[in-house]
Image (tube, rainbow, N blue to C red):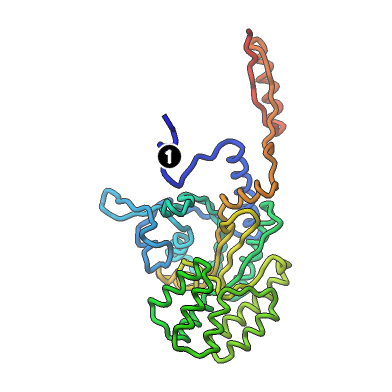
Amino acid sequence: MNTKQFTPEGVRDIWAKECIRKKELEKELMETMYSFGFLPVETPTFEYFDVFAKETGSVNAKDLYKFFDRDGNTLVLRPDVTPQIARAVAGLNDEKAEVLRLCYQGNTYINHSAYLGRARETTQIGAELMGVKEISGDAEMIALAVECLLRGGLSEFQISIGHAGYLKALVEASGMDAETEEKIGTLLSNKNFFGVSETADALPMDESLKNLFGTLGKFYSTAKEMEALIEAAKNYPALSKVISELIELDEILKMYGVRDYVTYEPGLYSSYRYYTGVLFTGYTLSVGEPVVKGGRYDRLLAHFGKEIGAVGFALVTEPFLNALVRQKKVSENSFSCEVITYKRAELADAIKRAKRLRSAGKRVELKEIKDE
């Protein structure tokens, strides 16, 4: 019988050496976060549906794994850890903890369409900085994300930085309706920038504003290039403010020494509606999925009753590991284990020897030689 039929769509078993590489990567990433002063937190695998309801701005309800407890409450497997941590922090009574640096590791579950061919269970390792509204907090998190990618073994990657307020400012200036805004968002998520320009061109707005919609798919390498963008947006104060924030961010990233790893895409779009400010996504060679995603979400905690600024990110271990293997950053024989062979009469001596070696930090496997 084909055992594959016992494994649900979108999940898989992780074996032996691959599992060791995964555990080692997770340990390295968590240690990196500890080095920035972040402390670990664990959240439940499932939550009340309301934690991820539409108002939260997380994963679409149709993509959640939903079930009921014995009291009839609707529960979901977590698709996203950030709203959980926001819920937990909002429930804290310790008003003295003005700034919280939290990190986590856990699996998330999204019921993707089978046609997408994407994993439905993934492992995320992330960090959340809460209680900081200044742009310096965004810079710290981007610097930490870069450090995680480097310490995890990657050397060739790029962090694309945008701002949730960029599209919002354009939408408000254009006066477009909610349906058109939704269409623009879908086009951006599919990287259909021609469709975005075409949709904007069909709307009654100033030519200068239509040109600014054309910048949604553009990348900027330097702050100087973005200063020219401020000139183009001078008649739209909200847009100018967003661009100024990105320029200020750029200056702080230079101080962290990570400027070479970032580019700017002001119109970067996320389907997570809780983001309110700086957004960033990291890609590397040989994998099509992002290895890191994050941003600022200053209004998410207010959904749970506490208003504080927050910014965070999550690293997804599956594409991270795939990149390391395809870029030959890890050895297929990274796990070494000494083998002690023995005949049945030599078992006692073999066990003593193995114990001595293990006490010295060695990995030891006992293997009996069978008499023929």
Q: Name which residue lies at 59% across and 44% down.
A: 23
Circle count: 1
Mark 1 crowd level (few <14, some 14–19, many ≥20, 10 Å Cα): few
- Lateral position of residue 133 relative to residue 150, left or right: left
Q: In the rendered image, which quarter contains the C terminus?
A: top right
Please, is residue 120 above or below residue 18 in the view?
below
Residue at position x 58%, y 64% in the image: 281
Secondary structure of residue under mark 1: loop
Q: Position of residue 287 (x, y in %)?
A: 60, 54
Task: Provide residue 303's location: percent of width, then percent of height.
Answer: 40, 70
Frontmost residue, 158 versus 217: 217
Does 166 appear above or below 47? below
Give the image location of residue 209, x and y in percent. Answer: 53, 86
Pick the residue in front: 144 or 177. Answer: 177
- Which of these two is toward me, 4 or 297? 4
Q: Quadrant of residue 133?
A: bottom right
Q: Tag 1: residue type?
A: Thr
Question: For the point 62% across and 57% down, which residue is it?
Answer: 33
Q: Is residue 82 above or below residue 250?
A: above
Please state if 185 lies on the left or on the right of 232 as rendered: left
Whether residue 132 is visible here, answered yes or no, is no
Location of the N terminus (image quadrant): top left
The location of residue 132, given as percent across then percent down, is 56, 72
> Is 162 on the left-hand or right-hand side of 251?
left
Taking 162 as reference, is 261 left or right? Answer: right
Residue that numbered label 1 is attached to: 7
Residue at the limit of the structure toward the top, as seen here: 372
Is 295 drawn above or below residue 345 in the view shown? below
